[in-house]
């Protein structure tokens, strides 16, 4: 009996020790402790904010650190730091519900932390509405501007009311979500590539002021794009530029369209989004800046954006197009002065025969006299990859107002980089001028023998090209030859802005009253 009693005691003791060890091992996974800010992949360091315990990247800190912690970012994320199947809900029965905060905002472009969705609406959970911009500047229900506009499907809700509406939990939508609330704007095939994608990424990139020339950044890739008003085919363009921009830049990103969003809304539960970058052209129309350009992207020009903000996207796309990337991440292309003239002869709008011939001969003369490289191309006959490679090599890009100028997105800017856009006299659109300005590329519009820069006081008022049939126009080719030579040989003489000039001197000036910048941006003011 004694041996049996001792054996039972030993068994009970071993079982008790095992239970204690199990508790210690698993207590970090307790549902009561779950909150979005407990997830390692949402640590501020991983979102681009400095580690308070580490020194600057240049080694100037006091604690002996040599840079950010060694984290697998932005590479492959170990499975261990992804939310587990059993951790898909955020509960606030013991912890208060996380309130929403605005990280960046300009009309039509907003970065929100802890945004909620329930039913047909987004919800900003806050007890201090005065710290937020007007809801009409985030999401608007229509195209009207000013006091006549109404807020769209986004609402303020207090913490107590939110807990009553949502219940005691919400489904956790982890990571970064890019949302475009546009609809009919996608009738323009270039809308995504020239407005939505650059605007979303430029807005988000402001959270990392130290994006390198090779495109290295601490910013996480978006986990998903959501197009609540578009079918699966509507966000695509027939040239497949949009798909390549997303798939090459963010290969793990999912795309959720109208039906998927409808599925979410049909389930009567709240969703808690970690980080949302929200874009809407209708809300952008509330800004005076939009009134001048009619381009939603123009509202982002006031952001305190890093100099290399577009590099992560551009380099990924160019690498997918076949261009090699060096050890530092920089795309390796021949940096010889290259002039590319996009020919549109035979299309609805083109140069007349004499102007086309004179322009071609003038460019060949520059090639001969200065040993520059000249490409006279018909992009209709070029694969998309070749168009991108051609643009990446180009110092000067010349073309008639039209979709092939979208290739300016792949130019690698330097002090001479220029887009020369040929307009039918009497018409002007900043459709390509605004993205060129955002990228730090000089832009000139041409009317016959007159040119105007992006900052010209006498720049013509907006007047879109009509739909034309076999319209031919002439230009002063001698003037264009002089303009090209000055842009290459004396770039400072004809530069309307530096990369720094479209960054606000005070980055806090574009934030709503009461809002503060994250510590990374404050450190750079």
Image (cartoon, rainbow, N blue to C red):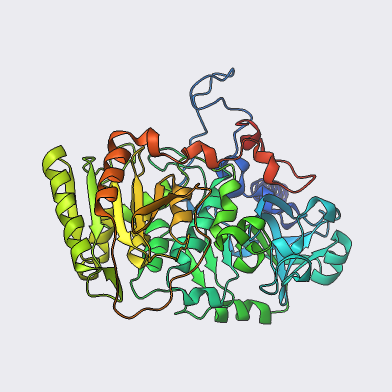
Q: Residue at x 63, y 76 (%)?
A: 264
Left or right of residue 305, residue 313 in this image:
left
Q: Position of residue 306 (x, y in %)?
A: 51, 40
Left or right of residue 377, residue 326 in this image:
right
Left or right of residue 77, residue 325 in this image:
left
Is 21 above or below relative to 380?
Answer: above
Q: Position of residue 115 (x, y in %)?
A: 70, 60
Quarter-wise, where is residue 379 in the image? bottom left
Q: Nearer the viewer, residue 2 or 131?
A: 131
Left or right of residue 23, residue 423 in this image:
left
**Residue placed farthest to the left in the image?**
368
Q: Total label count?
A: 0
Q: Residue at x 36, y 78 (%)?
A: 468
- Residue 88 visible: no
Q: Nearer the viewer, residue 64 or 310?
A: 310
Q: Position of residue 149 (x, y in %)?
A: 74, 70
Q: Position of residue 66 (x, y in %)?
A: 49, 24
Quarter-wise, where is residue 135 in the image? bottom right
- Residue 139 visible: yes
Is 397 above or below relative to 496?
Answer: below
What quarter of the picture does the C terminus occupy?
Answer: top right
Quarter-wise, where is residue 32 in the image? bottom right
Q: Nearer the viewer, residue 301 or 241?
A: 301
């Amino acid at each position: 009996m004694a041996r049996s009693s001792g054996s039972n005691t030993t068994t009970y003791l071993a079982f008790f020790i095992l239970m204690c060890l199990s508790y210690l091992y698993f207590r970090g996974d307790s549902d009561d402790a779950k909150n979005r800010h407990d997830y390692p992949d949402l640590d501020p360091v991983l979102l681009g904010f400095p580690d308070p315990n580490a020194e600057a990247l240049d080694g100037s800190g006091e604690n002996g650190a040599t840079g950010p912690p060694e984290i697998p970012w932005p590479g492959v994320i170990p499975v261990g730091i992804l939310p587990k199947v059993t951790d898909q809900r955020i509960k606030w029965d013991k912890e208060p519900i996380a309130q929403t905060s605005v990280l960046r905002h300009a009309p039509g472009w907003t970065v929100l932390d802890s945004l909620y969705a329930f039913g047909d609406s987004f919800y900003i959970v806050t007890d201090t509405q005065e710290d937020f911009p007007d809801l009409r500047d985030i999401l608007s229900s229509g195209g009207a501007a000013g006091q006549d506009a109404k807020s769209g499907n986004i609402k303020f809700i207090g913490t107590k009311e939110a807990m009553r509406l949502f219940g005691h939990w919400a489904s956790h939508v982890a990571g970064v979500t890019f949302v475009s609330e546009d609809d009919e704007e996608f009738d323009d095939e270039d809308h995504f590539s020239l407005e939505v994608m650059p605007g979303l990424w430029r807005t988000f990139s402001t959270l990392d002021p130290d994006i390198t020339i090779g495109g290295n950044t601490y910013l996480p890739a978006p986990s998903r794009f959501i197009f609540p008003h578009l079918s699966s085919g509507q966000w695509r363009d027939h040239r497949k530029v949009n798909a390549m921009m997303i798939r090459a830049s963010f290969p793990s990103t999912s795309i959720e369209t109208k039906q998927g969003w409808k599925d979410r809304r049909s389930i009567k539960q709240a969703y808690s989004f970690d980080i949302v970058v929200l874009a809407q052209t209708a809300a952008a129309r509330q800004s005076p800046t939009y009134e001048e350009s009619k381009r939603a992207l123009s509202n982002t020009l006031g952001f305190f954006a890093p100099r290399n903000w577009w590099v992560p996207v551009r380099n990924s796309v160019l690498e997918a197009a076949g261009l090699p990337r060096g050890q530092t991440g920089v795309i390796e292309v021949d940096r010889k002065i290259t002039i590319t003239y996009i020919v549109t002869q035979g299309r609805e709008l083109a140069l007349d025969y004499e102007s086309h011939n004179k322009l071609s001969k003038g460019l060949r003369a520059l090639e001969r006299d200065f040993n520059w490289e000249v490409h006279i191309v018909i992009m209709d006959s070029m694969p998309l990859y070749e168009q991108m490679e051609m643009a990446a090599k180009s110092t000067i890009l010349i073309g008639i107002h039209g979709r092939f100028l979208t290739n300016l997105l792949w130019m690698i800017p330097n002090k001479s980089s220029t887009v020369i856009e040929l307009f039918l006299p009497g018409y002007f659109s900043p459709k390509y001028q605004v993205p060129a300005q955002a990228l730090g590329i000089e832009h000139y519009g041409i009317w016959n023998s007159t040119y105007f820069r992006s900052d010209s006081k006498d720049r013509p008022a907006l007047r879109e090209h009509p739909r034309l049939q076999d319209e031919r126009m002439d230009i002063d080719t001698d003037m264009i030859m002089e303009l090209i030579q000055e842009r290459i040989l004396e770039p400072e003489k004809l530069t309307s802005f530096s990369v720094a000039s479209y960054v606000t001197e005070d980055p806090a000036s574009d934030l709503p009253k009461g809002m503060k910048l994250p510590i990374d941006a404050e450190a750079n003011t």
